Image: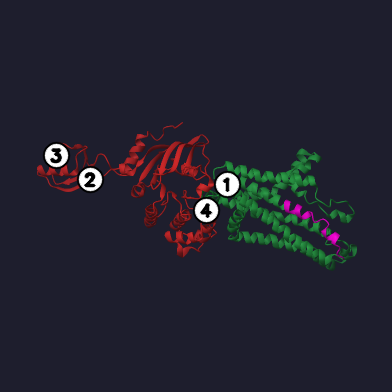
Chain colours: A green, B red
């Protein structure tokens, strides 16, 4: 297993595009999540009415335990960049026909897929760790007082976030294996969520079924937290049913990719 | 001799097209086995099935008497069609990836780079290599695990004469190390120079297989040049002449079995004619190849 991961990482770490795209992703992820409070302060300073109308220091955006869910929800927007990286990595293997050579050299098709799945897990893991550190540090800076029970409250969003990123990358992997062409696959990744929302609301239109759609279940792992600041109830933990649904789809994405690879002449 | 590869009834359909049709073949240890056939005769598809990248429609094959798993492939070195590497990586890095996949040692990288003469360019990006260097890197990569069997598919395709000579030298070096080599090519001269056995594929069907030594046996043709006005007529009188044809400034005499150029020379001398040129043409693989294809029937024959 570790051996397969090493093979794929060797391919990637010698690839400049990998460093550029991952650099963009992790740096943006870091700055956007870490700088929220400072940006608000800056805006409050510059815009006269803004600071007066709402006292930004009274919105506990970066207070424990809110900071966990807030940052994780924002971070969810950036996983598209990581999805693009996965698409480039996998479709390259088809474009260069290196998948073919890998198999000739003695990698089984399943081993090849495993190496890509493991890389997805590593990328999702790194995102989770980075976000945890950012949230921990910013939370400690901005929280008025630190109470252990509040700090550890809601940390269950981190496994959910890992699952969300990993699931999204699994989807990108499946699309790459099915489509093979990088440009087209990236476009599909861009429109897939919109298309699914269209189907959910305009074609099917049965609310109880919504949670069972693949991308919806993955997105549903992290619910929007910000309504709580206008005194609305928010879901402050991932639902078990959503976790199970998302896990099912993640399994299916990878399994279908396996079936496609196994069946095709490469 | 140990059987390296045994193929039984191997078949591949692409839609309604039968690319490979019921092939049976055995390759023994130490053979340099040439696979001949026109473009599109199913050579690469056959090799693709043997290397696990094309799923067979029917039939089976074994490597070293074992079922063909990906582990078995690690002990076979293969270059199919054209060299395939990651263009953004150096030759060295590409070989490191392949060595990891094959489970070959890092030292073997130095060794194969030396064999194919790429040690100086090892750290340059693969995309900067010339076609000849790419071919050599591919052969080097195939040698990484010190394989018992080497499969080369058109290894000299698109190379200049010097590149062809270099590849030929490498193949001879490897064959001398007692490795089994399967060489697909449509360059017959190439195959005749290096192979011990050969098979001919035509439209996916195996139409011939046997040792190269058989080629050249059988009837001979002798080229004759002599100053005589009626040479044609005199040659016809020779008892060993099956037929006489006027060639380009010479006559080509096809001999009956049991007669040689010496007999013809003696005959001419007795007639008072001195030949200024006498050359025995062995039947070339090229000629035999074309004959085999012609015997196999017209090109447009439907196979199914």
Q: Which residues are magenta?
A: A145-163
Q: Which numbered circle lies on residue B124?
A: none
Camera-side residue of A192 and B117: B117
Dot 2 corresponds to which residue? B280
Task: Indicate whether residue B191 is drawn in magenta.
Answer: no
Closer to the observer: label 4 or label 2?
A: 4
Mark 4 or 2 closer to N-term? 4
**Chain of the residue displaying label 2:** B
Q: Which numbered circle lies on residue A109?
A: 1
Same subunit, tags 4 and 2: yes
Residue neighbourhood size for the residue with mark 4, other residues' Cα within 10 Å, grouped as few (<14), some (14–19), many (≥20): many
Q: Secondary structure at mark 2?
A: strand
Q: Quadrant of the N terminus of chain B?
A: top left
Residue neighbourhood size for the residue with mark 1, other residues' Cα within 10 Å, grouped as few (<14), some (14–19), many (≥20): many
Dot 3 corresponds to which residue? B234
In which quarter of the view is residue A85 placed? bottom right
Closer to the observer: label 1 or label 4?
A: 4
Same subunit, tags 2 and 3: yes
Q: Position of residue B286 (x, y in %)?
A: 33, 43
Give how far apart the Cα atoms at labels 1 and 4 are. Answer: 14 Å
Q: Secondary structure at mark 3?
A: helix
Dot 4 corresponds to which residue? B102
Give how far apart the Cα atoms at labels 1 and 3 are. Answer: 70 Å
Same subunit, tags 4 and 3: yes
Closer to the observer: label 2 or label 1?
A: 1
Give how far apart the Cα atoms at labels 4 and 3 are. Answer: 67 Å
Closer to the observer: label 2 or label 3?
A: 2
Give how far apart the Cα atoms at labels 4 and 2 are. Answer: 49 Å
In which quarter of the view is residue A51 placed? bottom right
């Amino acid at each position: 297993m570790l051996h397969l991961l090493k093979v794929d990482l060797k391919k990637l770490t010698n690839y400049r595009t990998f460093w550029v795209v991952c650099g963009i992703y992790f740096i943006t992820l870091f700055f956007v999540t870490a700088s929220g409070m400072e940006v608000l302060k800056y805006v409050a300073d510059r815009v006269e009415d803004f600071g007066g109308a709402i006292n930004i220091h009274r919105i506990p955006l970066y207070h424990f335990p809110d900071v966990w869910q807030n940052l994780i929800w924002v971070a969810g927007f950036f996983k598209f960049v990581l999805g693009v990286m996965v698409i480039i990595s996998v479709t390259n293997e088809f474009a260069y026909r290196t998948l073919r050579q890998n198999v000739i050299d003695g990698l089984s098709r399943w081993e090849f897929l495993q190496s890509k799945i493991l890389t997805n897990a590593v990328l999702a893991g790194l995102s989770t760790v980075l976000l945890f550190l950012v949230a921990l540090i910013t939370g400690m800076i901005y929280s008025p007082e630190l109470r252990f029970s509040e700090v550890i409250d809601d940390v269950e969003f981190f496994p959910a976030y890992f699952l969300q990123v990993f699931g999204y990358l699994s989807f990108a992997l499946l699309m790459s294996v099915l489509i093979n062409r990088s440009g087209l696959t990236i476009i599909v990744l861009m429109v897939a969520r919109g298309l699914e929302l269209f189907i959910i609301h305009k074609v099917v239109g049965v609310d109880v079924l919504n949670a069972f759609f693949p991308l919806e279940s993955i997105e549903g792992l992290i619910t929007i937290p910000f309504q709580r600041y206008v005194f609305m109830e928010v879901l402050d933990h991932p639902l078990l049913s959503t976790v199970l649904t998302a896990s099912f789809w993640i399994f299916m994405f990878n399994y279908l990719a396996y079936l496609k690879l196994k069946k095709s002449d490469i | 001799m140990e059987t390296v590869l045994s193929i039984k009834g191997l078949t591949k359909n692409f839609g309604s097209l039968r690319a490979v049709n019921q092939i049976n073949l055995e390759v023994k240890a130490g053979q340099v086995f040439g696979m001949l056939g026109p473009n599109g005769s199913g050579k690469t598809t056959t090799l693709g099935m043997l290397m696990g990248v094309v799923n067979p429609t029917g039939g089976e094959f074994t490597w070293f008497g074992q079922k063909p798993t990906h582990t078995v492939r690690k002990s076979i070195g293969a270059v199919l069609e054209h060299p395939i590497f990651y263009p953004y990586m150096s030759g060295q890095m590409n070989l490191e990836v392949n060595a990891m996949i094959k489970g070959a040692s890092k030292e073997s990288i130095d060794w194969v780079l030396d064999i194919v003469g790429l040690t100086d360019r090892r750290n340059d990006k693969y995309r900067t290599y010339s076609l000849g260097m790419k071919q050599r890197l591919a052969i080097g990569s195939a040698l990484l695990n010190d394989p018992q069997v080497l499969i080369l598919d058109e290894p000299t395709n698109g190379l200049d004469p010097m590149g062809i000579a270099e590849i030929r030298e490498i193949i001879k070096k490897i064959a001398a190390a007692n490795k089994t080599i399967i060489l697909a090519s449509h360059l017959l001269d190439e195959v005749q120079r290096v192979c011990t056995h050969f098979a001919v594929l035509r439209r996916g069907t195996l139409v011939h297989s046997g040792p190269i030594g058989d080629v050249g046996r059988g009837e001979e043709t002798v080229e004759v040049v002599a100053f005589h006005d009626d040479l044609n007529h005199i040659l016809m009188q020779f008892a060993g002449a099956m037929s006489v044809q006027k060639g380009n400034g010479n006559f080509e005499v096809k001999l009956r079995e049991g007669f040689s150029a010496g007999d013809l020379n003696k005959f001419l001398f007795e007639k008072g004619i001195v030949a200024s040129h006498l050359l025995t043409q062995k039947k070339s693989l090229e000629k035999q190849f074309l004959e085999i294809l012609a015997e196999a029937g017209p090109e447009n024959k439907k196979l199914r």
